[in-house]
Image (cartoon, helix red, strand yellow):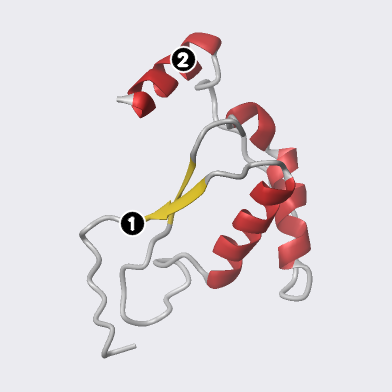
Amino acid sequence: MRVKKQIAAMAKRGNMGKPTVAVIKTSPEKVLEDIPTIMEMAGVKTALNSETTTILKDNISWHYPFLSANTTPWQLEGSILALKAASFSDLVAVHNNTVVTDPYKG
């Protein structure tokens, strides 16, 4: 119920308007330091409230690391580090029950 109230409050404040997209060129060596930059460019502090729980939805849907189908480790790590640096302290990672992975396959 708390989430529904938060969504309603965001809609009332106008925080659920048009999405913002930010793009930068990065490299494997710089991706973790570039994630906070791009999150700031996209307006993370305007879009999210650091005083409430922030849910990170990881996608781990396949046995093998298909980059377009799964959340990559550096995306999740970079997002967590960037959010913590931006004073988001209550972070929760979740996934749904449609995961089709088999831990024995890899």
Q: Is residue 55 visible?
A: yes
Residue 18 screen position, x and y as percent: 54, 25
Q: Amino acid at mark 1?
A: His
**In the image, 78: left or right of 67?**
right
Q: Residue at x 70, y 41 (%)?
A: 87
Could you tell whether 80 is left or right of 11 in the image?
A: right
Amino acid found under the numbered disc labelled 2: Ala
**Residue under label 2:** 9
Determine whether 22 is above or below 67 in the image: above
Q: Name the image quarter holding residue 3.
A: top left
Q: Position of residue 60 (x, y in %)?
A: 36, 67
Give the residue furthest to the top. Answer: 12
Is residue 43 visible in the rendered image? The answer is: no
Closer-to-camera residue (81/42)? 81
Residue 65 placement (x, y as % from top left): 43, 79
Circle 2 SS class: helix
Which residue does the image show at 48% across and 9% down from the upper left?
Answer: 12
Q: Which quadrant, please, contains the N terminus?
A: top left
Callout 2: 10 Å neighbours few (<14), some, many (20+)?
few
Between 19 and 4, the residue placed more toward the observer is 4
- Which quarter of the picture shows residue 19? top right
- Disc 1: which residue: 95
Residue at the location (31% across, 74% down)?
A: 62
Percent x, y for residue 26?
A: 75, 64
Q: Nearer the viewer, residue 85 or 33?
A: 85
